[in-house]
Amino acid sequence: MYEFNYHRPGSVADARGLLDSSDDAMLLAGGMTLLPTMKLRLAHPSDLVDLGNIEALRGITDRGPAIEIGAMVRHADVSRDETVRSAIPALAALAGKIGDPQVRNRGTLGGSVANSDPASDYPAAVLALDAVIKTDRREIAADDYYRGMFETALEPKEIVQAVRFPKPGRAAYAKFPNPASRYAVVGVMVAETENGVRVGVTGAGPCGFRASVFEEALNHNFSAAALEGLQIDPGDLLSDIHASSEYRAHLVNVMARRAVQSLGG
Ligand SMILES: Cc1cc2nc3c(=O)[nH]c(=O)nc-3n(C[C@H](O)[C@H](O)[C@H](O)COP(=O)(O)OP(=O)(O)OC[C@H]3O[C@@H](n4cnc5c(N)ncnc54)[C@H](O)[C@@H]3O)c2cc1C
């Protein structure tokens, strides 16, 4: 059976202390990924450090040019929050399309960003909006964060505290969901930022990435027509029972054009 010590600290410092006190301790957010992983015996932590009691990880704060969302904010709250809906409606819409109501009411922004599932939705937003991942040690720019399949720039025992999303001029997210899980077979966010158009892609590759060829085209001419005939190299993409790499490459273009069209381009 499962054998672990359960902790529910009241501060990030205490959580950090608990992580440091054992080699095999793991953080628990909503448990949406971690608990099934434990049930499959793919993870067997000695200690579970539940972040659910840490008030500092919960808020959504308007910081003027950006919105900061705490790691323990659930997807349902991101989708419903008035600050997010008015400043970055595309982010609220993205959160509202994650999984099903049960998943949205348990899953958290921090858990999703730390886990970096290749089919998760947030990487598209983190990259397109040029977000910053705030941890208990440092701030990590979006472009430095995603490294590979389930691999990020986070070090062992580093705690995601919040994600800061700069407010874009305008942005839209288009997703081709897996019909069973709603995970993204491909999801694309297009955003007009202060540094030009950014295109964040998720679902297609081992981790989120920017479609720089698309960004170049949209910076010259912000229209769906500008993306006609452009393609991401399928050689860099995933191929599995859900979709071949060629189909995913096709979908990246289709989702990008849909996002641009929904912004009037
Ligand atoms: C049926 C189903 C459908 C889903 N569909 C979608 C979908 O359509 N789109 C989508 O994007 N996602 C989807 N998800 C994923 C879901 O949205 C969760 O975000 C994801 O499972 C992470 O769950 P969690 O937040 O509960 O984190 P947990 O499962 O508690 O933790 C996940 C991992 O992150 C670590 N961790 C947690 N919090 C932190 C932190 N603050 N700092 C550092 N490390 C941390 C944990 O130690 C663990 O390794 C789906 C999940 C399920 C079960």
Image (cartoon, helix red, strand yellow):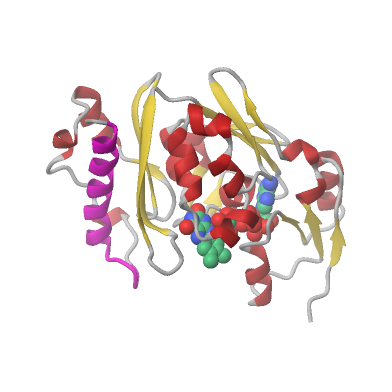
The location of residue 8, given as percent across then percent down, is: 85, 53
Q: Nearer the viewer, residue 59 or 86?
A: 86
- State the residue at coordinates (41%, 35%): 128
Residue 132 visible to an observer of this rendering:
no
The quadrant in which residue 30 appears is bottom right
Q: Quadrant of ligand 1?
A: bottom right
Q: 171 above or below 64?
A: below
Quarter of the figure with the C terminus: top left
Please identify the residue farthest to the bottom as the structure is shown: 1
Q: Is residue 235 above or below residue 57?
A: below
Q: Is residue 154 visible?
A: yes
Expressed as whole percent of the image width and height from the top left, the position of residue 61 reads: 65, 28
Q: Main secondary structure of the magenta part?
A: helix
- x, y (%) of residue 107? 62, 55
Seen from the viewer's position, the closer of residues 4 and 171 is: 171
| Image height of 222 relative to 181, above or below | above
Residue 184: image location, x then y, percent: 40, 56
Who's the residue at 68% across and 61% down the image? 31
- Image quadrant occupied by the N terminus: bottom right
The picture quadrant where one finds residue 35 is: bottom right
Q: Residue at x 25, y 24 (%)?
A: 219
Residue 7 colored magenta? no
Q: Residue at x 44, y 60 (%)?
A: 183
Q: Is residue 118 left or right of residue 259?
A: right
Give the extent of the magenta segment: 240-263
Q: Is residue 257 left or right of residue 179?
A: left
Is residue 243 rendered magenta in the image?
Answer: yes
